[in-house]
Amino acid sequence: MAPRHLRPSPSMARWRKGTRSAIEGCFEMMKNDIISLAANKEEDNSKIARNDFPPDFIFGTGTSAYQNEGAATKGDTGISIWDNFTWRTPYRIQDGSNGNVAIDMYYRFKEDIDNMKKMGFQSFRFSISWPRILPGGRRCAGVNKEGIKYYNEFIDTLLANGIEPFVTLFHWDLPQCLQDEYGGFLDRKIVPPPPLLGIQPRLDSNYMLSEDSAEPTENPHFTYRVPKTLASLYKSSYLANNLECDSSKNNFYDPKNAYIVARNLLLAHAVAVKSYRTKFQEQQGGKIGITLVSHWFEPLDPHKDEDVKAAKRAIDFMLGWFLEPIMKGRYPQSMIEYAGKHLAEITPEEFEMINGSIDFLGQNYYTAYYDGVDVKGYFAWSYSDNFEWAQGYMARFGIMYIDYRNDLARCPKDSAVWFSKFLMRNPNPPPNKRILNLMDTESKKRLRAMEE
């Protein structure tokens, strides 16, 4: 029998896309028009239909590697901080579970992609597991060909089903070896970022992540997902990045860690974007951006200046922390005023590199708000129930129900049925030219290989 930490837990035996000006418009709208936005009344959207949106508007769903894939020790896959954390301290997860099996998407992705196609989704956002590709954290420590083969097959299957891949390069599953070596994102050694750009997103494994390995693709790429949340975890004594932290001691826990990690994430993001634009973008014609997160904040009294400023400040500390450096090359003024001595230093040259380092902006939101930007797509999070970090498998907000007691059977929830009806109301959606071009490219390559 496998060691306990390698077995499933008991519960398992159960875009924002647009031009720079559009993004800046979103930022200014969110920061400066709180009072007027608060006055908007909710509209009745009960009869909303797919054809109420532009023909090129993208509807998709998403997952992340650690939360969904499973196959934690498959082949030469390395150990991530979440593997280590859940194995060593299961009591810190609500149900004592881990991502060893998750929803088994590693082995069942064809079934899942078929479900997405049946529901009518045009795109799918997923992340690449850093330790599955680079078990030793770096390219010089070896590349896992089996991991590369998996993602190639995954992407081929999406394309064959008319679903456009949206790739997230990193979604929190840092290789444990890098956490051990220098504290992960607490050290500037993490910049430049993980050399995953060679996967963009298709990769011929024979090239072993060399610069000429990326095949032409127009697919968008996200460097990081919700970096603010990741940065905040580094000041917590609770989650994976601080496994060695003993809450009874003060030798590790420090709220300033969040500002250090945020600075290093911004720099790593900017270096990744610069690398992509220099080495791949002209050849591939793709886009690269980042996904941020923010709640919506309104003043307690919209007529009181201090309440209005407090609401703006809250947005600055959640969204502006990352968006203002990316869009304007500086920290938000309110953060300088209220957290100046704690903010990690970014040099003028580094701010210049960070400034403008997105082609599009992804925005996670959990509370509704209005804005005036050119929104080009929507991804429902998430495709299925999954391992929801500290909550384990206790939280269920996927549109597909996962029966953890019945071989991880997939069952559509009411939300999946709603999406299916909504997306199918347009009986003749325009063909996805990007998908057709990608499929045509793949077909031509295979034909050439057969001829040779």
Image (cartoon, grey):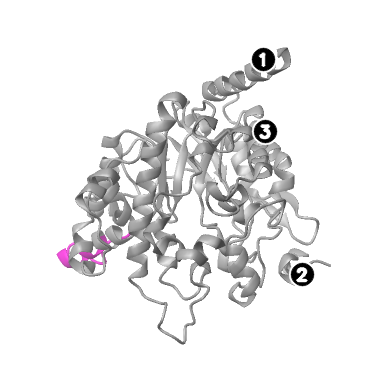
Q: Where residue 233 sits: x, y (%)?
A: 44, 67
Q: Going from the N terminus, do you reach mark 3 or mark 2 first?
A: 2
For badge 2, the amino acid type reads: Pro
Toward the viewer: 23 or 40? 23
Q: Residue furthest top?
A: 451
Please provide the residue range marked out in magenta. 297-311
Q: Which mark is residue 3?
A: 2
Question: Is 176 on the left or on the right of 407, as rendered?
Answer: left
Residue 72 at least partly seen? yes
Q: Where residue 230 sits: x, y (%)?
A: 44, 61
Residue located at (54% from left, 24% from top): 432
> Is label 3 or label 2 in front?
2
Q: Secondary structure at mark 3?
A: helix
Q: Residues within 10 Å of mark 1 (few under 14, many from 20)?
A: few
Residue located at (46% from left, 87% from top): 248
Q: Secondary structure at mark 2?
A: loop
Toward the viewer: 104 or 452? 452
Question: Is 80 on the left or on the right of 346, as rendered?
Answer: right
Vertical position of residue 11 compared to residue 77: above or below: below
Residue 7 found in image quarter = bottom right
Toward the viewer: 32 or 139? 139
For badge 1, the amino acid type reads: Arg
Q: Which residue is mark 3?
A: 157
Q: Residues within 10 Å of mark 3 (few under 14, many from 20)?
A: some
Q: Residues within 10 Å of mark 2 (few under 14, many from 20)?
A: few
Residue 271 found in image quarter = top left
Vertical position of residue 246 compared to residue 241: above or below: below
Q: Which residue is mark 1?
A: 448
Q: Where residue 204 sits: x, y (%)?
A: 61, 32
Toward the viewer: 452 or 369? 452
